[in-house]
Amino acid sequence: MGERATLAWVLAALLGASLEPILVKLGYRAEATAWQLLALKNLVAAAVIVPLARAPKWPGLPGVLRIGRVSVLLIVTNALSLLALTRLPAVTLMTVVATTPAAVALVARARGRVRPGARFWAAIVAALVGMALTLDVLRPGALAFDGVGLALAFGAVASSTLYRSAMEDVTAAFGPKVVSTWVFLVNAAVTSALVLPWSGLPPPAALPMGLWIGLAAAVANVAFLVALHRIGATRISVYTLLQRPFVMVAAAVVLSEPLRWSQALGVAMVLASVHVAQRAGREEKKP
C-alpha cells in the first residue's frame, strides 16, 4: 500500500508539473508576461496551499527562515522557466529540464548520499537519447535553437537541482506539507513585494490561465515534496523524466505542436529507461 501511495503522489506531481508549461504558453497567447504569471502563480498557490495542506503546524521562526532560504531557489527556477518559455517551445524546455535527474544524482553522489550503479547511469543516458529523439533532432534544422532561451532553461536546471537537493533535508526536518505551505507563503510574500508592484496582474483574458497555473503549482509541489520525502531526490527526479512525454502529447493536442515518428520512438525509450532506472537505481545508500 505504501508503494501505491508513493506512485499516486508521483503521478500527481507529474500531472501538475506537465500541465504548467502548456498553461503558460496559453497565458502568453493572451498577452500575459512572464513576470505577471510568476506573481499570480505564487499568490494563487499560497491561497490554495493552506486548505490543501490542512493547516500544518507552525515550524517556528527559525524553521520559516530555513524553509524561506530554500524557497528562493524555487522562485529562481520558476522565473527562469517562464522566461525560457517566451523563447522556446514547451517541449524543448522540458527536454532540457530532463537533464535534471542526472544532475541531482551527481549532487547526491558528491554528498555521499547514494551510489548509483552502472545500470542506473546507462538508463539515464538511454533516457536522454530518447529525449533527444522526442526533440526531433533528426529533422533538418532541428538544432537551430534560441541561445538565450537554452541558457535560461539550463539555468532553471541548475537552480532546480539545488532546490531538490536542499529540500530533501528540509522535508526530513519539518515534513512535506509544512514545507510546501511555507514555501508558497514565503514566495507569495516575496513576489508581492518585489514583482507585483511593477509587473501588475495579467490582462483579463489571461487571468484564467494564471489561476490554473497557481492551482497546478500547488498540487504539484505538495505531491512532489511528499514523494521526495518518501523516495529521495534522485529517484523522484528520475520519475520526472516522464514529464517530457506528457508535455509533448499535451502540446500536440492543445498547442498544435507537431509530433513525428522519431518522437514516438523517443517516448518509448524514455518509458523503458525510467523503468530500468527505477529498478536499478534503488541506489545503495552508504552505511
Image (spheres, grey):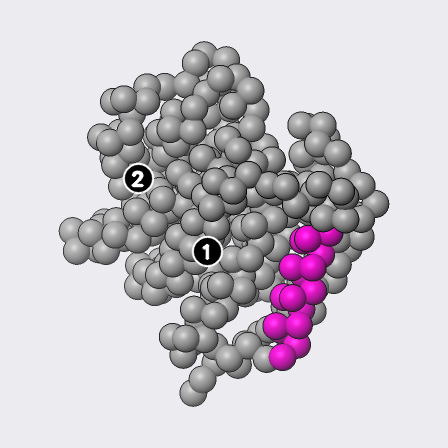
Residue 95: percent from left, percent from top: 61, 49
Q: Are marks 1 and 2 in contact (CB under 8 Å)?
A: no
Residue 119, magenta (yes or no): yes
Q: Which residue lies at the image location 77% right of the left edge and 48% below the top edge? A: 138
Residue type (three-letter) at the residue carrying disc 2: Asn
Residue 230 visible (yes or no):
no
Residue 95 or residue 273, whichever sits in front:
95
Q: Which residues are magenta?
A: 118-134
- x, y (%) of residue 192? 26, 29
Q: Is residue 63 above or below residue 121?
A: above
Q: Secondary structure at mark 2?
A: helix
Label 1: few (<14), some (14–19) or many (≥20) C-alpha neighbours in 10 Å:
many
The verdict on residue 17 being magenta is: no
Q: Between residues 217 and 93, which one lies in front from this camera angle?
A: 93
**Lower sequence index among marks 1 and 2:** 2
Predominant SS along the magenta part: helix
Residue for point 35% across, 42% down: 75
Q: CA distance from mark 1 to mark 2?
A: 19 Å
Residue 257 seen anywhere in this rendered image of the structure:
yes
Q: Position of residue 55 (x, y in %)?
A: 32, 43
**Which image quadrant: the N terminus?**
bottom right
Specify whether 144 is left or right of 61: right
Q: Is residue 121 left or right of residue 149?
A: right
Q: Is residue 171 above or below residue 109?
A: above
Crowding at dot 2, Cα within 10 Å, few <14 / some 14-19 / many 20+, comes out as: many
At x 60%, y 35%, the residue is 89
Label of residue 187 in the image: 2
Residue placed under numbered mark 1 in the picture: 226
Residue 28 numbered tag: none
Q: Residue furthest right?
A: 261
Which tag is nearer the camera, tag 1 or tag 2?
Answer: 2
The kind of residue on which mark 1 rests is Val
